Amino acid sequence: MRILIDTSLLVEGERRNFDLGEWVAAARHEVFICDATVAEYLAGKPLKDAGKEQRWKIYWESFVSLLESVPLDHQVCEKAGELLADARRRGKTMPLGDGFHAAVAALEDLTVATVDVDHFKALGVRAVNPLK
């Protein structure tokens, strides 16, 4: 399966609630992140706890930064806007980051691995929660 890893899943891996690397290896998934994931992950860096910051840095350097990242080009931005508007027409308001992830998944034929499966289903893309 071709997987786009959502930031929510990276956070679970970094916090050691889930062994994302083991899941990827066991299932032999082809995995990607996107540039929205990079921005979200970097923005979530712990600031007040040196131990958490060190753990975060190690996870970034040894795993996250090594994943292939799909760029957010003009086509992705247009698709994200369309998906978010369509969801809003159906009464669902989703975060912009989820819109970018959904657009990349739709354009690249990827399944989103996420804790927030309902967000991505509302945006019309395949999603799986490997924690369940």
Image (cartoon, helix red, strand yellow):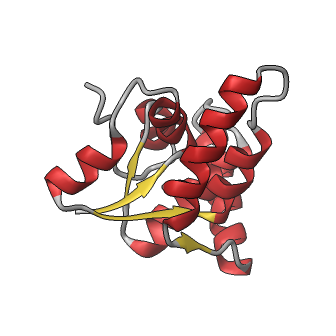
The residue under the point 49% across, 66% down is 67
- Could you tell me if residue 114 is visible in this image? yes
Quarter location, residue 82: bottom right
The residue under the point 67% across, 26% down is 52
Q: Horizontal and vertical percent for residue 46?
A: 76, 29
Q: Horizontal and vertical percent for residue 1?
A: 22, 63
In the figure, is residue 3 to the left or right of 35? Answer: left
39 up-or-down from 118: above or below: below
Observer-nearest of 36 and 25 = 25
Observer-nearest of 113 and 106 = 113
Name of the residue lying farthest toward the bottom: 74
- Could you tell me if residue 86 is visible in this image? no
The residue under the point 66% across, 64% down is 35
Q: Horizontal and vertical percent for residue 12?
A: 47, 30
| Quadrant for the C terminus in the image | top left
Quarter location, residue 127: top left
53 up-or-down from 124: above or below: above
56 up-or-down from 64: above or below: above
Observer-nearest of 130 and 63 = 63
The residue under the point 36% across, 30% down is 18
